[in-house]
């Protein structure tokens, strides 16, 4: 199991000291900042203009596009059984990314996924115990290396393994998606008078 997965609990712990400042609020032209006073740790901005939203901050920069008001697109859709859940849709939202900075990867190779996929193949598709052991010993030691080396080793012993999906969404992209939902939630609550914003810059 991955140890670097961004969970909702982890995200909420990271942002508990952040305060919101609305720098611009003119229809779909918005600039909302979340920052801990005296620190830039986990700081991020949400910037919107017609048809676009830019997240930029500690976890990179991503520009999304789908509908005229992207706050509406990302607004939380709580489920009846889990009303406190920050609902994110990583696969669908990743498709809406127009641009990202050089550090803002969306997906990455994950050795644990490769190991799990290998074990499933051996269990389901290889009858001989000796052959399973032979393939496992030949391949498994490369899976903690780069994706290229892992796929090279797999392809030498397993047909069609190049088609296997060995990636998962990065910690930073997942954190960013939680930030979109949570940040818009804070903005909506401030507009409704439910929480206090730090300031509105004019």
Image (cartoon, helix red, strand yellow):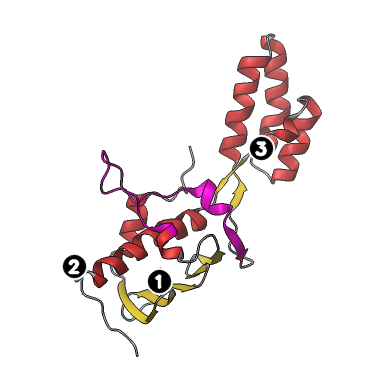
| Residue wearing tag 3 | 143
Residue 156 sits in which quadrant?
top right
Q: Give the crowd class for mark 1: few <14, some 14-19, many >=20 residues within 10 Å.
A: some
Q: Position of residue 63 (x, y in %)?
A: 56, 66
Question: From mark 2 to mark 1, how far is it between C-alphas?
Answer: 25 Å
In the rendered image, residue 98 lying in the magenta stretch gets the answer yes
Looking at the image, tell me whether mark 2 or mark 1 is earlier in sequence order: 1
- Left/right placement of residue 85 relative to residue 162 reads left
| Residue wearing tag 2 | 194
Secondary structure category for the residue under label 1: loop
In this view, 80 is above or below 31: above
Q: Give the crowd class for mark 3: few <14, some 14-19, many >=20 residues within 10 Å.
A: many
Which residue occupies the extreme left position in the image? 194
Look at the magenta stretch and give its main secondary structure.
loop
Region of the chain picked out in magenta, as a range = 73-99
Q: Check the picture and name the quadrant holding the C terminus.
A: bottom left
Numbered label attached to residue 41: 1
Which residue occupies the extreme top position in the image? 128
Looking at the image, tell me whether mark 1 or mark 3 is earlier in sequence order: 1
Q: Nearer the viewer, mark 2 or mark 1?
A: 2
Q: Nearer the viewer, residue 130 or 80?
A: 80
Q: Nearer the viewer, mark 2 or mark 3?
A: 2
Q: Position of residue 193 (x, y in %)?
A: 19, 71
Q: Are marks 2 and 1 in contact (CB under 8 Å)?
A: no
Residue 33 sits in which quadrant?
bottom left
Q: Position of residue 83 (x, y in %)?
A: 25, 46
- Left/right placement of residue 193 relative to residue 78 reads left
In the rendered image, residue 77 lying in the magenta stretch gets the answer yes
């Amino acid at each position: 199991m991955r140890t670097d997965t961004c969970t909702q609990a982890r995200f909420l712990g990271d942002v508990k000291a952040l305060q919101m400042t609305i720098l611009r609020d003119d229809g779909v032209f918005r600039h909302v900042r979340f920052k801990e006073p005296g620190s830039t740790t986990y700081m991020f901005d949400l910037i919107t203009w017609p048809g676009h939203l830019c997240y930029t901050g500690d976890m990179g920069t991503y520009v999304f596009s789908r509908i005229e008001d992207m706050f509406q697109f990302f607004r939380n859709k709580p489920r009846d059984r889990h009303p406190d859940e920050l609902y994110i849709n990583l696969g669908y939202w990743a498709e809406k990314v127009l641009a990202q900075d050089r550090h803002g990867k969306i997906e990455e190779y994950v050795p644990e996924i490769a190991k799990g996929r290998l074990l499933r193949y051996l269990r389901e598709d290889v009858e001989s115990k000796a052959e399973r052991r032979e393939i496992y010993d030949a391949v498994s030691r490369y899976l903690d290396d780069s994706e290229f080396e892992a796929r090279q080793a797999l392809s030498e012993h397993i047909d069609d393994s190049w088609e296997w999906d060995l990636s998962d969404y990065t910690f930073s992209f997942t954190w960013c998606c939680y930030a979109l939902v949570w940040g818009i939630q804070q903005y909506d609550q401030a507009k409704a008078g439910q929480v206090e914003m730090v300031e509105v810059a004019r």
